[in-house]
Amino acid sequence: MDIKKKIEDLKKDFSNTCDLITKELTTKDSQKVALVFIDNVVDQLILTTSVIAPLQDLTITSSTDIADTAMQRILSYSQVSEVKTKTELINGILNGFCAILFESSEKILIVKCVKWIVRLPVEPPTSAVVKGPREGFVEDIMTNISLIRKRLKTPTLKIENFKIGCKTNSEVRLLYLVDVADPLIIDKVRAKLNQIDIDGIVDSNYISEYLSAGKHYLFKQIGYTEKPDIATAKMLEGRVVILVDGSPIALTIPFILLEDLQSSNDYYTAPMRATFLRYLRLFAGLLAILLPGIYVAVLCHHIKVIPIKILITITNSIQGIPLSPLLEMLFIIFLFETLYEASLRMPRYLGLALSVVGALILGETAVSAGLVSPPAVLIVAITGVMSYTLPELTSQISLLRLIFTILGGFMGLFGLILGTVFLIGYLANMDSYGSPYLAPFAPKIKSDLKDGLMRTGIPNLDTLPKSIKNKKKRRTQNDRTNN
Amino acid sequence: MTELTTRQFIFVCLFLGITSKLMSMPVALYDSASNDAIWSILLGFVIEISLAILICLVIKKHPNSSLFSLLKNSVGTVLAYIILIILYAFITIKLFFALEEVYTFFKEFLYDYFSPLMFALATFFVIGYLSYKGARTIGRVLEILFPIIILGLLVTVLSNAGFVEFNTQMPYFKEGILPSLEGTLKNVFYFGNSIPLLLFVGKVKISNHFILKSSLAYLSLAIFVSGFCFAYYDIFGHSTILGLFALIDYSQYNPYILDLQRLNWLSIIVNVTKLFCSTSIMLYCLGQIGKMITHTQSTFIPIVVACTINFIIATFINYEIDAIKYIVTHYVSYITLAIILLVAILCIIMIAKRSQNVKNTIQ
């Protein structure tokens, strides 16, 4: 077939897009060859040195196919293969390969010349550490895999490839240690990944919603991390990790609530300090949820039980406030959440200014205007700060804070206790791939408590967590579980 | 299918066992037995622990059987249904009394007005949710809440321990042993809390020393409750401030340290949480009985029915706590004694039966 016809056909397949570049060459012995690739996706240097130069130098004997000879020549420079179907050809070009068409041969080759724009694996803003590794995942899946490979130099690290999204054709990789991870979990995750039917995956969060057991859970069932050291530690415990091309966030499965109370910093600091910080986070999180509700419940329903000195102070502060304690608290929470959301979405410099304006001017003006009382502003401010001790749970905390405030306002202490019992029941009912969400506290798993709220020294953490199903019992080399 | 670990089952025993025992029971027993009330408590615990051990033996002997199949094999189908209906009625009364206690407690101490409808709706929503989610969820909730509750109770109880003088109740048995026997007999309803444990046959993963652990748990409960009652009677027995709820009296009317009144909060939170947990277990048991009687696959409808029945009772039969106590001590306790005897006989028959390896379809 005429090479021009082949190029035209290919262009039609790409809807005549302007960034599909075609280059016609002539070899040393006057054979016509065409290169087809997408502009700005292939590396021009690789293209020139590894493809164009060898092709221009090409000479063939009458008995050999030009494509085979070209393949042999290019192979010494770059990764080259023959494509059998049109889909393979199109996918190859879309993934940054350069296609080589020949006039005297029906064979088509594709050569890897890809050069995506990749940022450096810098420390992710959401997981900053005082001590410890600072590398973070990036949007390029190969870089992310190399960051994990650098830390896990073992032949038991297995990586499975999936293509998800009929339009985006995103590469998704499932990583696990074959000698540690539970095969049932792997099978379940694999099956769920294969079932995903969607036009495109823009971020790993798209996948996490498919992998979650329930569609309407308030709490996440899949872990997220932007750091390769955390992903590695989780794989060593028997979890599987999912990387998605184009996303700097790795998913970890199974996930339990305790993981949100832990931080990678905990393992790079003294055990006593880490234990103290974990308890601090827990109490701060609980207070962030309950404090506005308790304040409203006491003021609306149980004012006579407040000690007299505190009561006088509060009464003086709320005198003249036109709103009821519940409405006042809801108003301040609404203001706080609006400021938070606006500061996230505004351009950075405006956002900074807005947070200062919000905190200092709006709050002060609202108090001076007599719309809200200082204790209510103080409580929302305190709980706002406290909620950020658990950054992964901030959205859940803010929603629960609102619910508990309403419960406290309508039903007082009774509502708060009911809400707490319901919340614990809700969490106790959750499972993530066979791991109880409240493990190792409910059900109690004694050996896992070594790294629960209390962290013992790393030499003592010699057993793998039982709350995560896995093949091994111990981290050490002489584990005999499989024998 | 086993749903509870032995540890979780022990928490179920403790939560069921402690229902009302720190609130209504000490006051009601003192009305009946006066200074000998502490002996009534000890005798009541002998009954309760004996029954609990018998039920635990059944659970251990038949780890893979359902209660219905066991009853059917032991006493025949018709009697099995009758027994289940009796258990249903008994647990419904216990649930009603426990809820009424929470409601009165709130109405008396924390609210100027507390709508019974609002109370019933909110309560049944939460305990209905927990009981529908099953024993596994309830067991896990108890595991989380138990340390908090026990810590709160210990702080409350120990805060007044210094005021106990050990002699204000002496001498015992001034009028012979009859008052203490009468006290137990009239209040045996409070010691019927181990009966719902029968519904956990085939649902517990039996670990080593299951019977020993369960017995020790009950013994600890008996020591704790008796200790609390002893201190309570010693401090408040002869005063005129004996109120409706022992734990509240205990934490509220401390004669020496006024600031200790703030502990009232602790006992309120602890007691209400404890009662929500135990009522969830009772509602779960009602759901299980309903499932056995109707042969449905899911517990949803039985629990909705149980919730509706109890909702109607809790909303519309709004007796004063004194009236309920009177009914309990004068009528219900005698019926309870008969049910305790019935359950004990049944347990002995079931223990004598050969254990089944094949699981019955109805669970």
Image (cartoon, coloured by chain):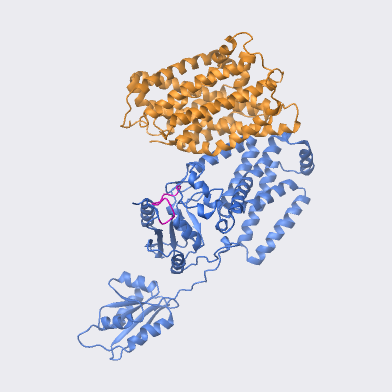
Chain colours: A blue, B orange
Q: Residue at x 45, y 77 (%)?
A: A40
Q: Residue furthest left?
A: A63
A265 vs B66: above or below: below
Q: Residue at x 44, y 29 (%)?
A: B211
A49 vs B245: above or below: below
Q: Dividing the picture into quarters, in which one does residue A72 lie?
A: bottom left
In front of the other: A160 or A135:
A135
Across and down, in percent, residue A85 comes to 28, 71
A413 vs A173: above or below: above
Q: Residue furthest top?
A: B175
Across and down, in percent, residue A46 comes to 41, 81
Q: Which residues are magenta?
A: A466-477
Across and down, in percent, residue A95 comes to 39, 71
Q: Residue at x 54, y 19 (%)?
A: B44
In front of the other: A149 or B53:
B53
Can residue B222 be seen in the rendering of this structure?
Answer: yes
Work out which quarter of the rendered image holds the N terminus of chain A and state it.
bottom left
Across and down, in percent, residue A89 comes to 33, 73
B332 vs A112: above or below: above
Horizontal relation, residue A62 to residue B258: left or right: left
In front of the other: A149 or A322:
A149
Q: Is residue A61 magenta?
A: no
Predominant secondary structure in magenta?
loop
Q: Is residue A475 magenta?
A: yes
